[in-house]
Image (spheres, rainbow, N blue to C red):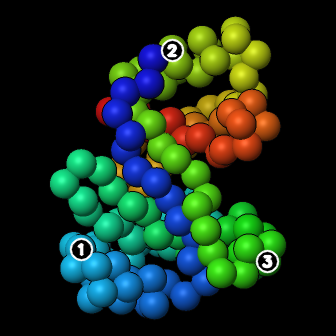
Amino acid sequence: MIGQLNHVAIAVPDLEEGIRLYRDVLGAKVTAPQDEPDHGVTVVFVELPNTKIELLYPLGDDSPIKGFLDKNTSGGIHHVCYEVEDILAARDQLIQNGARILGNGEPKIGAHGKPVLFLHPKDFNGTLVELEQV
């Protein structure tokens, strides 16, 4: 069902510092910050030859990333994102197999302009999983 790894998301307490580290220290190409109000985050993508790193920063006080950073003040890995061909078919198969979909179960449009869903971390060894339709 899942395809390739699309990205690994890292919550950062200081977006500018995160950008500086990846761009200036590690020498990676980093995209401009992009606000995603439906998800409560500002994101940048670090583009690598075989995948991406997504830096997440809270967009407002209601951001789920704010809560994550309150518990993990230095930041850290927030989720992994895998590609799927058909997000609705993947959702239905996951539900049949007992996996829980976060939210109302309907895909939202993610930072790449494609439908995404999140899977409950307790069902995936403590890892929050995002699925993105390709």
Dividing the picture into quadrants, the one containing residue 47 is bottom left
Q: Residue 78: horizontal and vertical position, in percent?
A: 61, 58
Residue 50 disc label: none
Mark positioned earlier in the residue sequence (2 or 3): 3
115 versus 9 height, above or below? above
Q: Nearer the viewer, residue 109 or 121?
A: 121
Label 1 sits on a secondary structure element that is loop
Q: Nearer the viewer, mark 3 or mark 1?
A: 1
Which residue is painted at 47% across and 69% down in the image?
55
In the image, which is nearer the foreground, mark 1 or mark 2? 1
Q: Which residue is mark 3?
A: 70
Q: Is residue 109 visible?
A: yes
Q: Earlier in the sequence, mark 3 or mark 1?
A: 1
Q: Nearer the viewer, mark 2 or mark 3?
A: 3
- Looking at the picture, which amino acid does disc 2 mark? Ala
Q: Residues within 10 Å of mark 3 (few under 14, many from 20)?
A: few
Q: Is residue 37 above or below residue 26?
A: above
- Spot occupied by residue 69 in the image (x, y as percentages of width and height): 71, 75
Give the Cα distance between marks 1 and 2.
35 Å
Residue at 59% across / 41% down in the picture?
Answer: 129
Residue 28, label in figure: 1
Distance of label 2 from label 3 (alpha carbons): 35 Å
Q: Number of labelled discs?
A: 3
Q: Check disc 1: other Cα within 10 Å, few if <14, some if 14-19, many if 20+.
A: some
- Residue at image position (38%, 85%) is 21
Name the residue that disc number 2 marks: 89
Whether tag 3 and tag 1 are in contact, CB under 8 A, the answer is no
Residue pictured at 61% horizontal, 83% vertical: 13
Depth check: 111 or 78 in front? 78
